[in-house]
Image (spheres, rainbow, N blue to C red):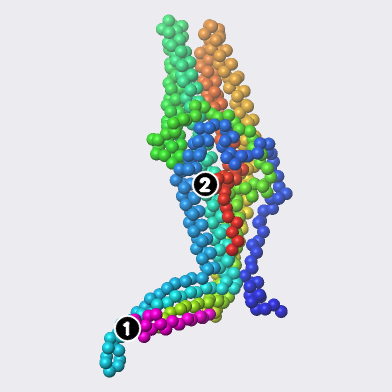
Amino acid sequence: MLPLGLLLASCTHHTPPPPPVDVEPLAFSTSGVQPIADHWWQAFGDADLDAAVDEALANNFSVRAAFSRLEAAQALVRQSRAGLMPTLGTFVTGSVGTGQGVDNNLRSFVEVGVEASYEIDLWGRIRGQIRGDVARREATRMDAEAAAIALSAAVVNTWIALGATREQIALLDQQIAANEGMAEVMNARFLYGVVRQGDALRQERLLEQTRAQRVERLTDLEVLEHRLAVLLGRTPDDTWSRPPEHLPALPAMPSAGVPLDLIRRRPDVRAAEYRVAAVNADVAVAIADQFPQLRIGGGVSNIPASAQALLTGWVAQLAANLVAPLFEGGRRRAEVSRRKALLEAAVADYGDTLLITLQEVEDALTRNRRQAELLALVDTQADLATRAADGLQAQYTGGLDVTYLDALSARTTAQELSRQQIDARRTQLALRVDLFRALAGPLPDNDDSENDDA
């Protein structure tokens, strides 16, 4: 038969259930071959972009708040560890009063002492609390890492949007110049009675429509500049001095690896796993809290008869207290049940996080593959539309049997498809960012998690 102490101690051991999703045999549907770098945004090959992301990671207020919460969690771990150490304190008490003798003299005394106490962690309650706080700290660390990755992705996406918007403005400037030239030709031909007024007005309308689109892109540009400034921790008017003039080159498709490696790397998955460990430790603490607590205390003090005897009469005391719950109406058992239910919820949340993570990667891989196909089709359409517009315009100005409406419609379509090309390239780059973000792990400068053993 086991001794009573070992039997009770065994009751505090609680193993969490296994994760509800087995990812080890799984593989992603497709993948690139380029290994993903720790600072993944450097794959875009833009030194100014690298500098912008570095500034954001250093100065963005939301990320600074996330790492401040990590410091608070670290302090909580140190506070929990203090429970394994004895407490030591001093005290001074004094009294002044009238004696009860015949002389009725004024009597006084001063007592000075040192007290110490220490709880023997028989059932692992304190160590379980430490394990839980360590796991919560690591979950907070992973939350901060996830915030850093989200911020870097936001900076890169804003950078891409700025480049696309500037390309759109440059393209619109070219289209405005071309439309202005054609409008002058049409107005001159109208004055000579060669074309109808309606045709000249249609060309003017196309010109004004293109100018209006340029105004919209200028608005987008200013808003994006404000957004980038705030992401960098600046005021909106303190814009970046070296904005992109065009879209960056498309980085190579990163290697997705295997799902098992992904879940070991993704900060949000690791955070969910740490939260399971934390709640599991809470269950052990609740179980241990049902058993007696042994506390040893002692002290040294003087008990003088008067203040003049302060340096004499020192007394030492040593005591041990064993406190055990007898009847609490099932409160502690209910707490164990509550924490076990929370553990089941944390495991379910962990499983949900795993599935969502796998979905994000698969979705990103699919969208990257399909967007490449879509971009190729848009490029083909734009080329065909431009050739058709040039041909119809040449035929129209050459006096052949082509209506101006046909030529105008072809030119409008060609210009719209040229703008769609930029949008499609922007989308392709943004989808590549989504894939990098879905695969990214903690930044090496911040991933300094501690392996604490309580």
Q: Is residue 277 magenta?
A: no
Q: In the depicted view, which residue is nearer to us: 214 or 346?
A: 346
Q: CA distance from mark 1 to mark 2?
A: 64 Å
Corner quadrant of residue 89: bottom left
Q: Tag 1, which secondary structure?
A: strand
Query: What residue do we see at 55% from left, 16% from top?
Result: 389
Q: Nearer the viewer, mark 1 or mark 2?
A: 1
- State whether residue 182 is above or below residue 365: above
Q: Is residue 236 visible?
A: yes
Corner quadrant of residue 371: top right
Q: Is residue 310 magenta?
A: yes
What residue type is disc 1 on? Ser
**How far across and down, in percent of the image, does residue 288 sit?**
58, 71
Query: What residue do we see at 40% from left, 77% from top?
Result: 112
**How far across and down, in percent of the image, does residue 428 sit?**
58, 33
Query: What residue do we see at 48% from left, 39% from top?
Result: 55
Q: Is residue 327 visible?
A: no
Report the magenta residues as a range: 304-320
- State whether residue 342 is above or below residue 38: below
For the residues bearing labels 1 and 2, Cβ distance under 8 angstroms? no
Per the image, the residue denoted by label 1 is: 108
Per the image, the residue denoted by label 2 is: 147
